[in-house]
Image (spheres, helix red, strand yellow):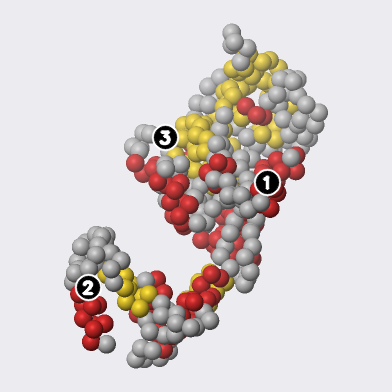
Amino acid sequence: MEESLDLFTRMKNGEFPDGKRTLRAKIDVTAPNVWMRDPLIYRIRHADHHHTGGKWCIYPMYDFAHCLSDYIESITHSICTLEFEVHRPLYDWILENLDLPRPLPHQYEFARLSLTYTVMSKRKLMQLVNEKLVTGWDDPRMPTISGIRRRGVTAEALRAFAYNIGITKYNGLTDVAVLEHAIREDLNKRALRRLAVLRPLKVVLTNYPEGKVEELDGVNNPEDENAGKRKIPFSRTLYIEQDDFKEVAVPKYFRLKPGGEVRLKYAYIIKCDEVVKDAAGNITELRCTADLDSKTGGPTANRKVKGTIHWVSAAHAIDAEVRLYDRLFTEAEPEKDGSASAESSGATKRDFKSVLNPRSLEVVTAKCEPSLKDAKPELRYQFERLGYFTLDKDSSLVTRHSSPIFNRTITLKDTWAKEAHKG
């Protein structure tokens, strides 16, 4: 004992190089559980620590530090993943062989959460950060708390997801669509509805008076009768989504087309009369007429058309940078080799970075209704017909005259399910 104490003191004082000495717990070298065979509990490492600098050169091993940290911090239930089940006897042995007032903490093991279309390993996430494949730990594509928060996912949505999937004692893979469903369900109830056009196409209503501006009533949230309404400016020149017009429409296309009609949300029915193109043949403008009696409360307000699209008034729209985030990987199991022969032969798994989604982020300059100039980071917004969005923290760095920055939390529908079905 005296020799061990002397050597341990000399280890602490920095007398020995890395690896020259270790401190072990004397238990049983013949124990069936290898983790109980006189395990290492202290090692030498001459390296600066981010808290203590070069003051210490000895450090406890995980199994020694884990149980003591839990006890010191008054942890009652220490939740671990399944691989720590064989470590629990050592966790208990260390605590029970110290003169500590009871009660003692207890370790419980459950399967780790694994999601499709992402990786949960901290080592792999660190690779993405260090190799600048993402912008940082709080990149909204990352499955970190800071990334999820920055993307606009609420704590309530995460809790609902965790409650619904439950806990298990076997390893499995949870479809990320389950998480996305919980997010959509939560945001549908809380998000304020707003009009925004991501890829603008100019529309001129030729029979609408020049200079006239109306203020139309827009519902803030149809799921919440207490959310009230807002005023949306409407004028002769508008922007609609490029995808909401087709010069040559496919069957069952119910949006705008030459000679076709569509309703503008909260406003009028319009008909496309003329398509204006530039010298290169690109569509630059649509000239339409509006049924001026078709507004809510008007003589033909109940006239039925099959399509309804969103819009913003060109004269009143504000520009916004919109970051369209999507799943980080193109395949459900990024770390799994898709080749059956590779698996059967025991071949090395593919590099998970080889299936990074090149379209996991697209940045566009959108045209938004003017109320979004006063967007708040603690609120959530549904850009009608497009998805759910939140104000990014980078918006706080811009001046009041600059464009706000929005992150897409999630689309309104699961577009990946449609693509998988096609495949």
Distance Cα–Cα, label 2 vs label 1:
51 Å
Residue 60 lies in quadrant: bottom left
Tag 2: amino acid: Lys
Q: In whole angstroms, how far apart are the C-alphas of marks 3 and 2?
A: 56 Å
> What amino acid type should be assigned to the residue bearing mark 1?
Ser
Q: Which of marks 3 and 2 is nearer the N terminus?
A: 2
Picture layout, residue 286 above or below residue 329 = above
Q: What element carries label 2?
A: helix
196 or 218: nearer the eye? 196
Report which residue position mark 1 lands on. 339
Residue to which mark 3 is pinned:
403
First of labels 2, 1 by sequence position: 2
User: Does dot 1 land on a helix, a strand or a loop?
Assistant: loop
Quarter of image, res 61: bottom left
Q: How many labels does the image show?
A: 3
Can residue 299 be seen from the camera position used here?
no
Q: Mark 2 points at which residue?
A: 12
- Foreground: 193 or 325? 325
Give the residue at x 46% y 35%: 321
- The answer for how far apart the CA atoms under marks 3 and 1 are is 47 Å
